[in-house]
Image (tube, rainbow, N blue to C red):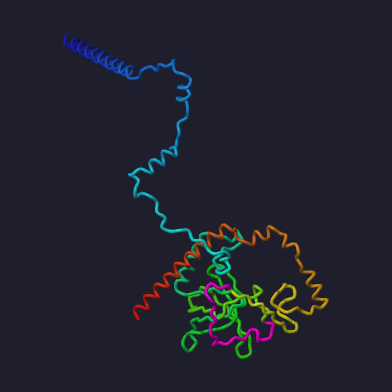
Amino acid sequence: MAASMTIRNIAKQAIFIKNSSIGFNSKLNVAHKSTHRAHNPNYNRTSAEVTLALRPKQNFLHHDLVDKHRRSPLQKGTEVIQTETEVKAPRDYRFVMPEFMPRPNFEDRDRVLEKLERCDMFRRRANITIPEFYVGSIMAVSISDPYAPNKRNRFVGICIDRGGIGLKAYFVLRNVVDGLGVEVMYQMYNPTVHSIEVLKLEKRLDEQLYYLRNCPLEYSTFSFDMEPVLLPRDAQIPVNTLKVKLNPPPWEQKWERQNLKGIEPLELTPRMIRGIEMHLKPWEKYDLMLHYRSKVPEEEEEQIMSEVYKEKLKQDSLRKVTKATLRKKK
């Protein structure tokens, strides 16, 4: 009898729990239905209202609204102030510092390496003054020499070549010492270089003056005690139109085939004339791709030269400040 009573109580409890859960779920369903009302479309709208409702919304602010907010008093003090103005290099500035120009061959280009090289060159120029010079200028260079009496060696000569890109930039000076032609190649950014002076700033008609090796020594002789020749400020670089006379052949190179402008007219033999005709390339001046591959794009050239010119102005201003402070201390 007791067992039957427990079974009945368990059954009643199960029925109660089931009915209570059903009621709870039914309440949830009713509440859910009450929150989501059915969408009743309004068929009484006009066509203009329907077009306005279906028009895509703008994802930007109108310029009138933007100007209104900009003129608001709350925007005072938030204007963008340009601290640095754009500095453009003078035209043909690449001839003043050609070593900063990148390599024209795109296969050898590395923009990260070029940027790092320019930074190193700027640091070097902050410690040493590298003046403007060209092929044909007379220069004096002092370098450290452990075998010299005062641990420093100074050489004076005419610049017969200038080349190289980046930290590998170089120039060659030539002079006559004890009746013998001497040529010295200097790495422009070598730390052993103490000073570079331009005694006479001028240009020549040719890009290289290696033909001075086959000329009389008088064209390559310069005094080591030569005084600097100063040019007026903002004056144009003078061009020396001197034409030298070559010694009789044999020469180190076939100078007659190089279309040189800085030598006197040569007496050509029939063999020389045949060699000139064989090595003529009149089609090169019409080869557009050859000219394109041999130069850097103009936009990139302006960008790099503007950066170099801006850095040079900054270094010049710092030098003026340091000189002024040194004068005050004296």
Judge from the rendering whether residue 258 lies leftward or rightward of residue 15; answer left or right: right
Residue reaching furthest left?
2
Q: Main secondary structure of the magenta part?
A: loop
What's the residue at 19%, 10% (across, down)?
4
Q: Position of residue 56 (x, y in %)?
A: 47, 30
Which quarter of the rendering shows the C terminus?
bottom left
For the image, the number of numbered tags is 0
What's the residue at 28%, 14% (across, down)?
22
Given residues 67 and 96, the one toward you in this image is 67
Judge from the rendering whether residue 6 lies leftward or rightward of residue 50; answer left or right: left
Give the quarter of the image for residue 241: bottom right
Which residue range is magenta in the image?
A: 213-236
Residue reaching furthest bottom?
178
Residue reaching furthest right?
270
Residue 327: say if magenta: no
Give the quarter of the image for residue 1: top left
Q: Position of residue 132 (x, y in %)?
A: 54, 73
Q: Position of residue 243 (x, y in %)?
A: 69, 79
Q: Position of residue 171 (x, y in %)?
A: 58, 75
